[in-house]
Image (spheres, helix red, strand yellow):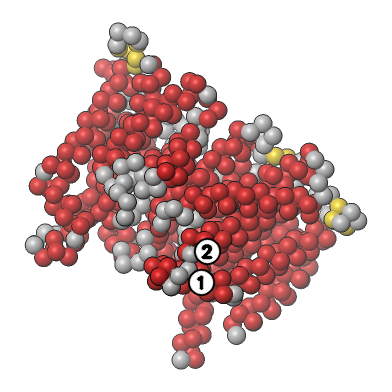
Amino acid sequence: MAQALLGLNVGVFYAMLSLGLAVIFGLLNIINFAHGAMYMLGAFIALIGYSLLEQWFGISLQIGFWASLLVAPLIVGILGVLIERLFLKRLYDLDHIYGLLLTFGITLILQGLFANYFNVSGTPYPGQPESLSGVVNLGFMYFPTYRLFAIVFSLVVCFATWWVIEHTKLGSRLRAGVENPDLTQAFGLNVPRMVTLTFAFGAGLAGLAGVLAAPIYSVSPLMGADLIIVVFAVVVIGGMGSIMGAILSGLALGLVEGLTKVFYPPAASTVIFFLMVLVLLFRPAGLFGKEK
Amino acid sequence: MTNRILFIIMMVAGLTAPLYAYPVFVMDLLCFALFACAFNLLLGYAGLLSFGHAAFFGGAAYITGYVTKEWGFGPLLGILAGAAFAMVIGTIFGFLAIRRQGIYFAMVTLALAQIIYFLALQMPFTGGENGLQGIPRGQLFGFIDLNNSLSMYYFVFAIFLIGFGIIYRTINSPFGEVLQAIRENESRALSLGYDVDHFKLLAFVISATLAGLAGATKAIIFQFAALTSAHWQTSGEVILMTLVGGLGTIFGPVLGAITVGALSHELSAFGSWVQVILGTIFVVCVMVFRRGIIGEIQRLASRKQG
């Protein structure tokens, strides 16, 4: 049970990241390879904002954890806007692999930049708020308060996103833009702007996940590098068809990984990939995907 | 015409390289060149973006290292064993990956390759993070001592030429024509009665085997199978090489591998800045330079003629 909760803890990060990917993929048809780097960026913004602003720029403003939850997604989102406006916009008419390759290049740049200034082995994030330290008694076990907070917070964000996309006017416009951009545009909706904002939102989700992860895992330039590939596998398993698919498969696979860690530790880092193989064999479109 | 000139340049440069360049460095470039050519066969001619080619490159290196070190295989047999291993996992990966298309295909190959990476990290014989060390170069055919760097060089150059020849023959065969037809319009190729999946799988296996050949050779050269060669960033680097040189051209990947390889070598003193620079090249290539070096040359040449 304890392991299941810890697994769920990993799962919410998978869910948030694959949700961001799914949102971007849905509207832009681009796999954002830089998603892992944006997650890393979110964590670094929290770290820099908390402890390095003064040292670097002489600004005596300390951005605490709560503020980071707002500031980091915002900054990463703005970066997303820039990337979409400057680069991706020009690639839509080409084969989709160019979008993947472009974002891969951006990943290398971001990783390299941070690896220059920070140790690859990682820096602990010192800004975890007092109110979230300690443990909670869940009846059957004691669980770190912060981790419980991360789980609940991420779940709320994920389901709110799902609700907005599936049940609001804004969401229905987005989905219309995906289905038929020309027609949607003819109805007077600004599709290019929707696309930009969606990319920014997806990127912001990655940044938010980064801030949440910072106090649990230490902050390092490569923290997103291997995670993103696991998230890709999650995406293949879930199938890109639905937002809910991304959330549920993310959570489920986090659980599976957590439980594997208990029963057969050496397989923990590969179990998701093996599951992906199984899914590909029996349901190539993914568990929640629609056959084309 | 351009190809013939380029072939002569390549032969002359390849044969004389040890006279003016450090042989081990050139051998390294040759391995990457073969690796990039193998990758290009898949992306440039069949339109399949594999993001997991490091699995074949790195996996073969480990197998070659193991059989030569522990089982006493000679260098040639060891390299063949590595390539055969790449062929086997290439068949499995290809079978699974061609079930999905486009970006999904890339993600699936990437995820599958990650299994090999973790195996290389965790298996008892691989040396974990340190890699598999102390691989003997041995004697070719029992009497040519490969510890001599010149004989090693020409051995590697021969392997490169064989691999390059196989790719050249594959592209310029009816099989290669069908691959390009699939790249251009998959559903039309299907409606013409071609078993598209079968062709894709074959291309994947050939590409994987040759990528393995390159990795296996590299293990013998450096007497070392490194974990980094199985990491996904190596898969990315080979894409970059192909893109810089020219996607879907025969000599592009060779030139791209030399360019990127030489660049990383020159810049290695700058630490992580190399990554930043490679990333920037990536972005520039994708944005404004999609034809690559050879592609641009060909375009200029054809414009002059036309």
Residue that protrudes farthest toward the front in the picture: B193
Residue that protrudes farthest toward the bottom in the picture: B306
Q: The N terminus of chain B lies in which quarter of the figure?
A: bottom right
Labelled pair 1, 2 in contact (Cβ < 8 Å): yes
Q: Which residue is under mark 1?
A: B178
A179 over A120 or under it: above or below = below
From the viewer's perspective, tell me whether residue B285 is left or right of residue B257: left
What is the spatial separation of the Cα atoms under label 1 and label 2, in whole angstroms?
8 Å
Q: Secondary structure beneath disc 2?
A: helix
Q: Position of residue B22 (x, y in %)?
A: 74, 60
Residue at (71% x, 68% y) in the render? B161
Q: Position of residue B128 (x, y in %)?
A: 63, 34
Residue at (34% x, 14% y) in the render? A143
The picture quadrant where one finds residue B150 is bottom right
For the residue pair A200 and A184, the one nearer the viewer reads as A184
Mark yes or no: residue A235 visible. no
